[in-house]
Image: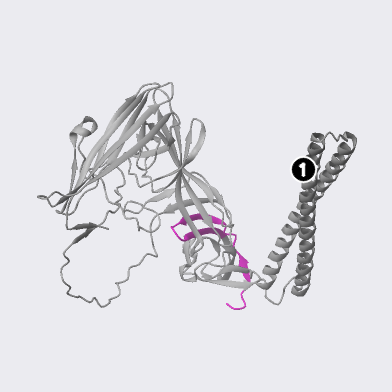
């Protein structure tokens, strides 16, 4: 086989399956071969392909092959460190000359700036002298006008010189930066490689065969992203376009290929935790109880199922809800090996939406335009960023969690400029009396709302109170001082639905108190 000539197999890219951190590339080619041994060559391919992942399958003409083909990857270095295109010493000398020239330009500009400041001081002093002379009835208008005209002409000339010098300094800086990039490239040359695949096979009879070659490549990944367009009106709706952002720097361009995307993690393994000594010590019980307030994020992936499902913030890659998802691009796509993001369409749908204004004044003193809709597509929505488009254009970027088919989800489209929100929290401390061991901290929260628009607004106002995990600390909401006598839910949240007319105002009040034992110390 060593003396067998190569036959070039034209095997263009057929499909690419992208995982979270790699890609499975498939090529297909058809060739007519004589009976006996043959050696095929597929080029060019990615030089970073995984040799262990190389596979070949016979799609047609298997009757001519009594044995399976053998294949391997070959690589060749195209650039060597000894083949530097430029003399580094010449570049270094050019750099020193450019640095010296730039320093001289900066010095000259500094001198012109100092001269300009001196001229401005002279002009101000000349005007002050003219005012003083006029007070003493010494009038010399012609001399004063001549002096000021000369100073103004010189000042304008200096300003023009400073402007030209600034442009020269900017160009010199850009030239020096380009030269330094050339020096860096010469000091650390980028070695390029060419790669190809060799296939050895023996045909029992002449004929045509169709082969599919597949291999894994690193340096490629994808992430889901979306474009949401809110269409307001009597019947508001939300149009959601699902896309895949693809990056790849594998050394081969993917042109007009079928792209598929998977959330499977073929490289995700598990290792047992390392064991370490856990030293247990006995210490006296403290006479005081130390407590602290902590923020707890309520985590769920939606509210369309049988209660919220907990999610893991440390989940690597794409959140697929625990079940691998396979997606396919609409039509053929082209992704160049440039490391830049390329967007590929995955599908779209439009569904009815409910629009309201959400106010969480403790977090943001604004009424956020909230849109609630349902996943009307045929596939789940994976977690990813969302470009938000409203009537006025692009309003920002949000994010969406995993949403199953038919499940509801929320998106925020920025604050409503017509609604003003003002929150005030007054706190008062009460020391325990002679017969009591409880300290009381009273809170009076007041949220004032006003609508400056010409249309009524429906607002959902939400406040929160702490949740105590200790018997020595109690949280009580006072219904008399709370609007509507609202009570908190299990998470300590209270909500109100407020209808604001045009130019209308409203106030939401919340009164609650925290009682803690005298032996409780707050950190």
Residue pictured at 40% horizontal, 27% vertical: 236
Q: Which region shows up in magenta?
A: 1-30
Residue pictured at 39% horizontal, 40% vertical: 364
Figure quadrant of the N terminus: bottom right
Above-or-below relation of 490 to 170: above
The x, y position of residue 491, in whole percent, is 23, 45
Above-or-below relation of 109 to 411: below
Q: Is residue 23 magenta?
A: yes
Please say whether residue 61 is visible from this viewpoint: yes
* Relative depth, front residue between 97 and 443: 443
- Determine the image quadrant of residue 499: top left
The x, y position of residue 165, in whole percent, is 79, 53
Is 306 positioned to the left or the right of 19 in the image?
Answer: left
Q: Dot 1 lies on which element?
A: helix
Is 287 positioned to the left or the right of 80 in the image?
Answer: left
Q: Is residue 508 magenta?
A: no
Figure quadrant of the C terminus: bottom left
* Relative depth, front residue between 363 and 250: 363
Residue pictured at 85% horizontal, 42% vertical: 153
Q: Which residue is mark 1?
A: 124
Is 390 positioned to the left or the right of 432 in the image?
Answer: right
* Relative depth, front residue between 202 and 260: 260
Q: Coloured how?
A: one colour
The x, y position of residue 397, in whole percent, is 47, 43
Is 446 positioned to the left or the right of 86 in the image?
Answer: left
- Determine the image quadrant of residue 283: bottom left
Crowd around label 1: few <14 · some 14–19 · many ≥20 (10 Å): few
Please say whether residue 355 is visible from this viewpoint: no
Question: Which residue is at the far left?
Answer: 435
């Amino acid at each position: 086989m060593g003396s067998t000539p190569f036959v070039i197999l034209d095997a263009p890219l057929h499909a690419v399956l992208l995982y979270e951190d790699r890609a499975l590339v498939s090529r297909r080619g058809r060739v007519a071969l004589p009976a006996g041994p043959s050696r095929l060559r597929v080029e060019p391919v990615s030089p970073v392909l995984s040799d262990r992942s190389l596979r070949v399958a016979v799609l047609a003409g298997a009757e001519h092959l009594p044995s399976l083909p053998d294949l391997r990857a070959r690589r060749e270095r195209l650039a060597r460190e000894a083949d530097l295109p430029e003399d580094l010493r010449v570049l270094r000398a050019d750099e020193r000359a450019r640095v010296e020239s730039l320093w001289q330009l900066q010095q000259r500009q500094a001198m012109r700036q100092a001269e300009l400041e001196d001229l401005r001081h002279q002009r101000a002093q000349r005007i002050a002298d003219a005012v003083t002379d006029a007070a003493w009835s010494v009038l010399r208008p012609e001399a004063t006008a001549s002096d000021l005209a000369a100073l103004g002409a010189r000042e304008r000339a200096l300003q023009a010189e400073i402007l030209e010098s600034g442009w020269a300094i900017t160009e010199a800086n850009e030239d020096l930066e380009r030269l330094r990039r050339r020096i860096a490239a010469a000091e650390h040359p980028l070695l390029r490689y060419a790669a190809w695949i060799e296939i050895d096979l023996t045909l029992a009879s002449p004929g045509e065969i169709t082969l599919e070659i597949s291999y894994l490549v690193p340096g490629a990944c994808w992430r889901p992203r979306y474009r949401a367009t809110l269409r307001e009106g009597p019947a508001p709706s939300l149009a959601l376009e699902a896309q895949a952002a693809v990056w790849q720097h594998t050394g081969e361009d993917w042109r007009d290929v079928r792209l598929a995307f998977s959330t499977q993690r073929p490289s995700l393994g598990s290792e047992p935790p390392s064991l370490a000594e856990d030293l247990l010590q006995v210490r006296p019980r403290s006479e005081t109880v130390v407590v602290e307030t902590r923020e707890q994020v309520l985590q769920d992936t939606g509210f369309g199922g049988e209660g919220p499902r907990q999610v893991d913030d440390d989940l690597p890659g794409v959140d697929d809800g625990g079940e691998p998802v396979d997606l396919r691009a609409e039509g053929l796509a082209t992704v160049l090996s440039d490391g830049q993001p390329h967007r590929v369409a995955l599908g779209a749908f439009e569904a009815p939406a409910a629009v309201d204004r959400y106010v969480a004044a403790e977090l943001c003193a604004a009424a956020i335009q909230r849109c609630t809709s349902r996943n009307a597509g045929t596939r789940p929505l994976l977690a990813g960023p969302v470009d938000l488009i409203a009537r006025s254009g692009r309003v920002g970027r949000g994010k969406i969690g995993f949403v199953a088919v038919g499940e509801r989800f929320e998106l925020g489209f920025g604050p409503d400029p017509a609604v003003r929100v003002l929150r005030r929290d007054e706190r008062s401390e009460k020391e325990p009396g002679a017969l009591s061991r409880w300290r009381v901290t009273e809170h009076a929260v007041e949220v004032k709302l006003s609508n400056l628009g010409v249309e009524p607004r429906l607002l959902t106002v939400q406040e929160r109170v702490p949740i105590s995990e200790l018997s020595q600390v109690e949280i009580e909401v006072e219904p008399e001082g709370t609007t509507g006598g609202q009570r908190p839910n299990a998470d300590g949240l209270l909500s109100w639905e407020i209808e604001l007319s045009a130019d209308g105002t409203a106030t939401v009040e919340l009164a609650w108190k925290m009682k803690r034992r005298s032996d409780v110390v707050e950190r």
